[in-house]
């Protein structure tokens, strides 16, 4: 192990504690962004060595507020995209936490990944994965997953989509569409 963030079995919302972190993203400069969603409603930012930089977000539904930030990714422009699960939107921030935009057309986003400038969104409320343009958030394709209980998602270099379910106890792999 080379780094630990947080303190084992000590929940909180301070610079060295979390309360139900759900995902992590690493920027091109190796800064670390943690979606701290189950107990807190914030994004925490750290240096590559683990020094706390800042946190942003508070529980609510206004732009910049969060309600169960679950998935987090950083796109090729350096924007931080957050699956704001309970608010049923993806919020977009710069790396200092300034609100840039929100996309409310992506179901109940629970997990995110990016491949070839396409945003993949696991929709926890329906049996589908949405593929959206990173330019404007418009849905460009969908993958039918036959079960609406997806909880995690990853896309490999060949664009295979891996979808995991906590409730269903499975991991399914979908081939890319042509």
Image (spheres, helix red, strand yellow):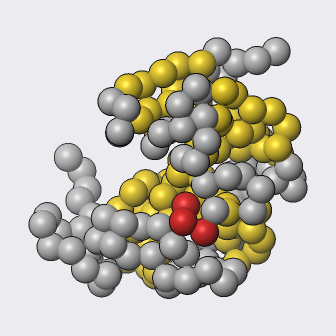
Q: 149 or 49, which is in the foreground?
A: 149
Task: Residue 142: name its quadrant.
Answer: top right
Q: Residue at x 29, y 71 (%)?
A: 19
Q: Residue at x 12, y 66 (%)?
A: 9
In the rendered structure, the answer to whether residue 74 lies left or right of residue 14 reads right
Q: 125 or 5, which is in the foreground?
A: 125
Q: Position of residue 135 (x, y in %)?
A: 86, 53
Task: Residue 8: name its quadrant.
Answer: bottom left
Q: Position of residue 173 (x, y in %)?
A: 53, 19
Q: Position of residue 74 (x, y in %)?
A: 62, 54
Note whether 161 is above or below 7 in the view shown: above
Quadrant in which the C terminus is drawn: top right
Residue most extreme to the left: 9
Q: Position of residue 56 (x, y in %)?
A: 52, 81
Q: 136 or 73, which is in the foreground?
A: 136
Q: Residue at x 44, y 55 (%)?
A: 24
Note whether 24 is above or below 13 in the view shown: above
In the rendered structure, the answer to whether residue 56 lies left or right of residue 103 reads left
Q: How many marks?
A: 0
Q: Residue at x 82, y 44 (%)?
A: 139
In the rendered structure, the answer to whether residue 141 lies left or right of residue 160 reads right
Q: Is residue 114 visible?
A: no
Q: Is residue 41 visible?
A: yes
């Amino acid at each position: 192990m080379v780094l630990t963030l947080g303190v084992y079995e000590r929940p909180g919302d301070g610079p060295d504690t979390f309360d139900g972190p759900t995902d992590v993203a690493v920027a091109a400069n190796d800064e670390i962004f943690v979606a701290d969603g189950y107990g807190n409603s914030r994004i925490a930012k750290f240096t590559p060595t683990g020094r706390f930089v800042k946190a942003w977000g508070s529980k609510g539904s206004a732009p910049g507020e969060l309600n169960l930030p679950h998935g987090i990714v950083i796109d090729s422009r350096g924007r931080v995209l957050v699956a704001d699960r309970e608010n049923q939107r993806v919020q977009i921030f710069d790396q200092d936490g300034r609100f840039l935009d929100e996309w409310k057309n992506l179901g109940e986003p629970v997990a995110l990944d990016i491949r070839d400038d396409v945003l993949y969104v696991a929709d926890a409320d329906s049996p589908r994965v949405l593929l959206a343009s990173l330019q404007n958030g418009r849905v460009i394709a969908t993958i039918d997953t036959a079960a609406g209980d997806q909880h995690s998602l990853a896309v490999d270099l060949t664009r295979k989509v891996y979808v995991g379910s906590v409730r269903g106890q499975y991991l399914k792999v979908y081939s890319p569409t042509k």
